[in-house]
Image: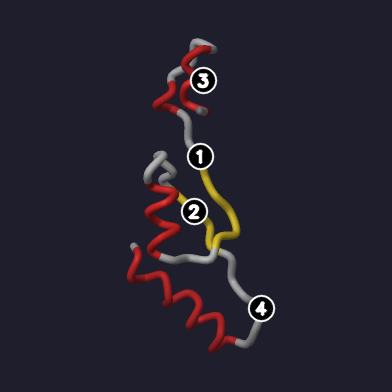
Amino acid sequence: MLRAAREEAGRDPKALQVFSYAIHPSRGKRDHYAEPGVEEVVAQLPSGDEGELLRALDAPAEFL
């Protein structure tokens, strides 16, 4: 819908970049956002100690 609105306004719809913030990474969400053309997401990290944060950063590696 965003790309169609952009095209109707006379702008290049391919130049539109859409980002999603604060998601909890999973394969399903990756696929959900990729389908409409979202190329980048920013994952939400839990608050915690160093070990928790490192595990949270390692977890989505399988989806990249």
Disc number at residue 6?
3
Disc number at residue 47?
4
| Comparing labels 4 and 3, the label whose residue is closer to the camera | 3
Image quadrant in which the C terminus is located? bottom left
Question: Marks 4 and 2, Cα distance to the nearest angstrom?
Answer: 19 Å
Q: Nearer the viewer, residue 49 or 21?
A: 21
User: Which amino acid does the dot numbered 4 rest on?
Assistant: Ser
- The residue drawn where x is 51% and y is 20% is 6
Question: Marks 1 and 4, Cα distance to the nearest angstrom?
Answer: 26 Å
Q: Earlier in the sequence, mark 3 or mark 2?
A: 3
Disc number at residue 18?
1
Q: Earlier in the sequence, mark 3 or mark 1?
A: 3
**Mark 3: few, some, or many residues within 10 Å (few <14, many ≥20)?**
some
Q: Secondary structure at mark 1?
A: loop
Q: Earlier in the sequence, mark 4 or mark 3?
A: 3
Q: How far across and how far down the image is residue 8, in percent?
A: 50, 12
Per the image, the residue denoted by label 2 is: 41
